Image (cartoon, helix red, strand yellow):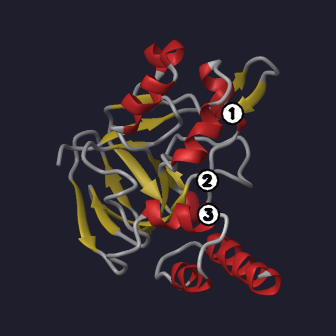
Amino acid sequence: MSGARLFLGGLRPLPPENRPTGIFKAESHQPLWLGTEGLGGDAQADRRVHGGPEKALHQYAVANYARLAAAFPEAAADLLPGSIGENLSVAGWDEDSVCVGDIFRLGDARIQVSQPRSPCWKIDARYGQDGIARWIDETGLTGWYFRVLEEGQVEAGCDFDLIERPNPDLTLARLWRGLKELRPSLAELELLAAASGLTPGWRKKLTERGEWLRKNT
């Protein structure tokens, strides 16, 4: 696998309403500290849905951009790594090859996959193209978040290595399907909700969906 690319940014107004956002990131080539709240120097506007210990670092699959560009050719010139607001880009990893709870070594830090990213309206506004967030939701090409298990220094080109996989069959793609399917099996929902390393918010979503299906089937 290739070395890591790192992106960070402050808050900027997001047209057309000019609400503050941290989605605009610039690539960093300097050593950075990765703490439990994220990369030093990075900012998030709405910490209810971005940032914090369970979403300290965001990765988006490099390969997803080609699929996005094919679906939205008008925005293709802007669909480049770092543009969707991710902090981390490493070729060779995607939602079919990353599992819930995976633990990676990134530079001197140790990080764990906690949940997918749920796409929001800011993605459409970022690219000036309606429908991108909905397409991401429908295809499951969402990217994912990490929690930081061990803080440390990271920098461009540093190693990104899988060191532990507690749930080898529970890919992020499978997790997303489990939540989005019209009638997933109760056994599947229970299995996903019990995944080691899954963030509590997602555990609650899956459990509540299972309870609703149990009552309404």
Q: Where is mark 1, residue-wise? A: 122
Residue 85's x, y, as percent?
53, 36
At numbered mark 2, what does the secondary structure look like: helix, strand or loop? loop
Crowdedness of circle 1 by 10 Å Cα count: few (<14), some, many (20+)?
some
Furthest toward the front, the residue is 217
Residue 106's x, y, as percent?
29, 57
Residue contact at pointers 1 and 3, CB within 8 angstroms: no
Q: Where is mark 2, residue-wise? A: 51
Please say if 186 is above or below 37.
Answer: below
For badge 1, the amino acid type reads Lys
At numbered mark 1, what does the secondary structure look like: helix, strand or loop? helix
Q: At 45% across and 59% down in the image, what residue appears?
A: 173
Q: CA distance from mark 1 to mark 3?
A: 24 Å
Crowdedness of circle 2 by 10 Å Cα count: few (<14), some, many (20+)?
many
Q: Quick check: 162 left or right of 113?
A: left
For badge 3, the amino acid type reads Glu
**Mark identifier at residue 181:** 3
Please say if 118 is above or below 22.
Answer: below
Please say if 81 is above or below 143.
Answer: above
Residue 66's x, y, as percent?
37, 29
Q: At 30% across and 64% down in the image, what residue appears?
A: 104
Q: CA distance from mark 2 to mark 1?
A: 15 Å
